[in-house]
């Protein structure tokens, strides 16, 4: 199986991503889960990741806490979307498994140094603070990471936390900028993709029909999470952002995109965290990311349903 580290800020859609990975154990080996402050503060993302491991019967997976704030800015959170705990919706048991003592940044550095070069993929589902700190601490990592597959940014679709910026990049633009400049192969799942995978009723009912504890907890999470978009925009479900990252590792043919240059705005107060994607190659800037734009939404939900059923 392909070795991955999941860096995350759970979040109901992060939960769906983690479940998709755990349900795909033949293909993906989760070396560890690192958490970062994002949707909710670090103490809650550290709690939530452990709840998810236990819910999926994987208390053996180690969870490491990382940065509790962005590199240079105060933390912005998203309780307005995810609720007070980040995983509002189902009744969840407090975790009993321990949080690791090691800092997430040290775990990332040590793991990538100890595994063969080019064998570990980083899956990032939250602000990129931990990854940028790891690259700063250990610049040799850049040449050893197979790929970063990230949920972040938006281009034709615009932003979801400001008119210009997507949440994960907005929270820590300096970190995202460092990652895009790192030279590591990047696959980017922007809002342009994730806003095409909505939790339509029929899709949620297929998850509910699985009937297991993890599946029913996921349904309760998604029903809480989607209310933000349904109430505010009248849309038919909520956008399932983060699991697109894991789905890409399992079924890249569900996606299409382009290799292009991406830069992150870090100075303007109006557009901080904007991902400027040179989709039409109007600059001579070197490409640094494979930016996805299309997804087979039904194929994605079939995959998610099939794998959650395995938990
Ligand atoms: C991203 O922000 C978070 O709220 C979600 O978990 C996702 O990672 C979407 O903009
Ligand atoms: Ca997230």
Image: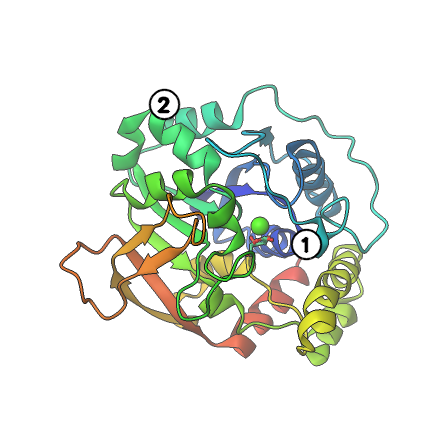
| Residue 100, x across and y down, in percent | 62, 24
Of the image marks 1 and 2, the number of the one nearer the N terminus: 1
| Residue 189, x across and y down, in percent | 44, 60
Q: Which mark is residue 137?
A: 2
**Residue at image point 28% right, 40% down:** 182
Examine the image and state in which quarter residue 200 appears: bottom right
The quarter of the rendered structure image containing the C terminus is bottom right
Label 1 and label 2: CA atoms lie apart by: 31 Å
Mark 1 CB near ligand 1 (8 Å cut): yes
Q: Nearer the viewer, residue 194 or 301?
A: 194
**Residue at image point 78% right, 52% down:** 88
| Residue 133, x across and y down, in percent | 41, 29
* Residue under pointer 1: 12
**Residue at image point 73% right, 78% down:** 201
Q: Nearer the viewer, residue 170 or 304?
A: 170
Q: Residues within 10 Å of mark 2 (few under 14, many from 20)?
A: few
Examine the rendering and report whether any part of residue 55 can be seen.
Answer: yes
Examine the rendering and report whether any part of residue 119 can be seen.
Answer: no
Q: Would you say 310 lies left or right of 184 here?
A: right
């Amino acid at each position: 199986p392909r070795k991955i580290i999941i860096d995350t800020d759970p979040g109901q859609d992060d939960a769906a991503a983690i479940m998709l990975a755990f349900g795909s154990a033949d293909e993906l080996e989760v070396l560890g889960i690192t958490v970062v402050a994002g949707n909710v503060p670090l103490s809650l993302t550290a709690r939530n990741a452990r709840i998810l491991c236990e819910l999926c019967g994987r208390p053996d997976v180690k969870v490491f806490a990382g940065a509790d704030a962005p590199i240079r800015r105060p933390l912005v959170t998203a309780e307005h979307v995810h609720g007070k705990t980040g995983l509002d919706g189902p009744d969840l048991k407090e975790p009993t498994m321990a949080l690791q003592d090691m800092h997430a940044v040290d775990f990332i550095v040590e793991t990538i140094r100890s595994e063969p070069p080019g064998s570990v993929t980083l899956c990032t589902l939250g602000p990129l603070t931990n990854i940028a700190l790891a690259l700063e601490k250990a610049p040799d990592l850049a040449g050893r990471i197979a790929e970063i597959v990230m949920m972040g940014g938006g281009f034709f679709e615009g932003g979801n936390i400001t008119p210009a910026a997507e949440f994960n990049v907005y929270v820590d633009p300096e970190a995202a900028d460092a990652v895009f400049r790192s030279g590591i192969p990047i696959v980017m799942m922007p809002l342009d993709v994730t806003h095409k995978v909505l939790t339509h009723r029929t899709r949620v009912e297929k998850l509910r029909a699985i009937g297991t504890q993890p599946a029913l907890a996921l349904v309760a999470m998604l029903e809480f999470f989607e209310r933000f978009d349904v109430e505010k925009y009248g849309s038919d479900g909520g956008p399932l952002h983060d699991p697109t990252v894991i789905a890409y590792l399992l079924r890249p043919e569900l996606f299409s995109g382009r290799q292009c240059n991406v830069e992150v705005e870090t100075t303007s107060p109006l557009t901080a965290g904007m991902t400027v994607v040179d989709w039409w190659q109007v600059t001579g800037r070197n490409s640094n990311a494979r930016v996805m734009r299309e997804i087979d939404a039904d194929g994605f939900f079939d995959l998610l349903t099939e794998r959650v059923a395995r938990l």
